[in-house]
Every structure is written in structure tokens, then in C-alpha cells.
Amino acid sequence: MLNNKVKVAFIGVGAISGIYLQNIIHTFKEVEVCGVCDLIEERAQKGIEYVKEQIAKGADVRVPKLYTDMYEAFNDPEVEVILNITRPYEHYEVTKQALLHGKHVYSEKPLAVDMEEAAELVKLALEKNLCLGGAPDTFMGAGLQTCRKVIDDGMIGDVLGARCTMIGHGPETWHPDPEFFYKRGGGPMLDMGPYYVTALLQLLGEAKAVCGMTRKGFAQRIITSQPHYGTVVDVDVDTHLTGSIQFSNGAIAQICTSFDVYYAPEDQARFEVYGTRGTLVVPDPNTFGGPILLLRPEDTAAAPKTDPGLEKRDAITYYKGYKQIPLMFDYCENSRALGLTDMCKAVRSGRNWRANYKQQLHVLEILTSFSKSSKEGRWIELTTKYERPEPMCYSPMHGILED
């Protein structure tokens, strides 16, 4: 076991916690889970049991402490970083109290559910000289890092725009506790939008304005997953949101996120970037890997003899003729906790971290501006500023990040 590991406490041990635990135990060797806490103690106990099972299989880790409440974790002098993976509307209070107790915080997305809460958290972190960051960290994976390099190296020329869609019929058929998706802080834009918008910022840079149109497709949803099968949930937020983002470099992106549409699961995520010298198909930004597809003028040298739209096809072949680009970076598997580990590295070394509060804040302003634009019937000029963090660097050991 490496010495000087950064000690992390989980606040929230729900559905997403499993992959964090798995990766901290088996992949990221500079972070250690020293304790867990959840409002439902059985969830925390289940997390501890998982760690014990991994120890029995040979994992060189410790059994985490069980905290009775979050303040016990905040007052534990051993804890350096709080991993806040509570429900979105709880992020603000948990992060605020952790910062007030002198702990660095990495939270699941979003940073908070509105800009007022988020700005207060950033101000508090700066006042206390504490690290504040959070998900998504998928942009640090092999897929999006490779896409960033393809664009930065000029392989599609100057970027003209992008198009992103995340279309489905909501999480109530599979998520064990889906009600929060339809309450304050929920909806498809705040839930899934962070992956797409963060990816857009990584590829295109700072955004400057947003225009949106939004609606609520269904007043109620019926949960068909266990253990809440049959429960009727009132929908309090917009569930079909679409709009445009104008970037400082002149590019324009369209985005649509929906929990209202019946759609084939394999086609729910689509992400394309258009340039003057080609089109790049970006992998699902909720993942860390590929595939990545590229179409350039030389791939379409033979001009069509008729209108392509009139050609008969047996099935839709969206990307026929595109070439697959090999991944050029590490972490192509589900690597959640990569961003947490990167921030923990910053806690030790003092360097910058990539999934930082500046990115989270810019993303949140974009996400919340779609509904604001729709309600006010106008473009929303963004007030936050953004600079892309450094791309990922090569490290000879998987699971240990660069200094």
C-alpha cells in the first residue's frame, strides 16, 4: 500500500457509490476511503461489506469507518476530502458544511442546483483556501481526451458547431430511487446535461450565450423499478429542454435533453462536432472510452449522382463511410473517481486540478440558462468565465496520476 494516501470520506452511499468504491480500491492507488455515511444506514453498511469482500479477495485496503451522521465525518481529523454523492438538491448544504469544517470537497454533478448556491460555495472555498471540484470527470477519459486532441491538432479544421442529444423516457424503469430526478435540481438537463456541456467546453472552450426552449411533457411519472414499483411521482421540473449555445470562438452548438421521448436505448446519445475540414463523432460523454469516428472531404470524394435523401435504404446507417480513430490516452473503462483522484493529487502537490469549481460553475450557468431563456423569451448572456484545464498527461503507471 502506498504511503501518504489522501483520506476520503463518502457522504452518500447510493447507486453511484459502487463504481467509486470499486475504482478507489482497485485502480486509483493514491486515494483511501476512511469512512462512509448515508441517511439510510443500510446503504453505508452495504458499502462497508463490499470493501470487506474485496479485502477477503486480496485487496490491500482498510475497512472504512461508519459515521452516524455527516458531522461526525466532518469532525474526523483523519478526513481530508469529502466525496459528496448525495442527491442534487442536497449538494449545497453538504458541501457548505464540509467547507465550514475545513474539508476539501469533490461532489457529484451539479455543483449546486442554482447559481446563487454555487457562487456561495465557491466564495467559501476560496476564503478557506480549500479545493472544490466535482463531476463529471468523463472528459478526462481516453475518448474525450482523444477528441480534444483531434480538434486541437486541426484535423477537422476550424470548428463551426456541434449537435448533442440525450433522448430517452426517464430513469424510473431502472433506477432504485428515481423520484429526485423530477424534483428541484432534477430534470434531464441538470442530470445528463453536465456530461454534454462539460464535453463541449473541453472541445470548444468558453461559452458566451444561451438560448433555450423547454417544457414538461408529463405531469406525473409511474415508477416501475424496485423497491418503489407503482409509486406515482409528481413532476416539478421541465423534462424536455432544447436550445443553442454560442461559444467565444464563434462556434454554435445545439443541444436537446429529454426524459419524455420513447427512443431506442442504443441511440439515446448522439454527439457530433462540425468543422471546415471534417465531422467528428464524439462518443457518449457519459462514458470514458470510444468509439470516435471521423469523416473528412477525402472520404466523400465521389460526389453523389442524385439527391442522397431520395435513396432507398433498408435501415438508417448514420455513419457509413466514417473512419474510426484510435484512442490516444489512458482510462477508457468506467473510471469514475478519476477526477476525485486528480483533485486529491492537487491537495498533496499544490498543482491545479482539472474537474475544478470554475468548470462546474460555467457548466451550471449554461445548464440553468436554458429554462431561464425559455421563461424570459430572450438570449441569456453568460457572466462566468472559463479556461480549459490542461489535457491529460501520460503516466507510466495506470492509477497513479502525474505530479
Image (cartoon, grey):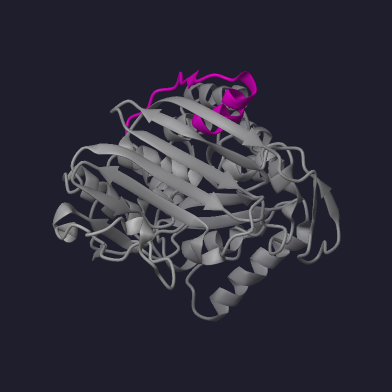
User: x, y percentage for residue 32?
Assistant: 49, 57
* Residue in front for this viewpoint, 384 or 338: 384
In the image, the segment drawn in magenta is: 365-388
Instruction: Say whether residue 59 is left or right of residue 183.
Output: left
* Residue in front for this viewpoint, 340 or 32: 340
User: x, y percentage for residue 191?
Assistant: 59, 45
Residue at the far bottom in the pictured view: 57
Q: Residue at x 59, y 39 (%)?
A: 241
Residue 179 in view (yes/no): yes
* Residue in front for this viewpoint, 79 or 390: 390
Q: Which quarter shows the N terminus?
A: bottom left
Instruction: Say whether residue 15 is left or right of residue 256.
Output: right
User: x, y percentage for residue 161?
Assistant: 33, 38
Above or below — where is 109 with respect to 374? below
Residue 103 position by quadrant: top right
Question: Magenta stretch: residue 368 in it?
Answer: yes
Residue 101 in view (yes/no): no
Q: Residue at x 44, y 54 (%)?
A: 270
Instruction: Say whether residue 151 is left or right of residue 231.
Output: left
User: x, y percentage for residue 119?
Assistant: 55, 23
Instruction: Say whether residue 127 is left or right of residue 152.
Output: right
Q: Residue at x 56, y 64 (%)?
A: 265
Question: Magenta stretch: residue 206 in it?
Answer: no
Q: Residue at x 46, y 21 (%)?
A: 382
Q: How many marks?
A: 0
Residue 338 position by quadrant: bottom left
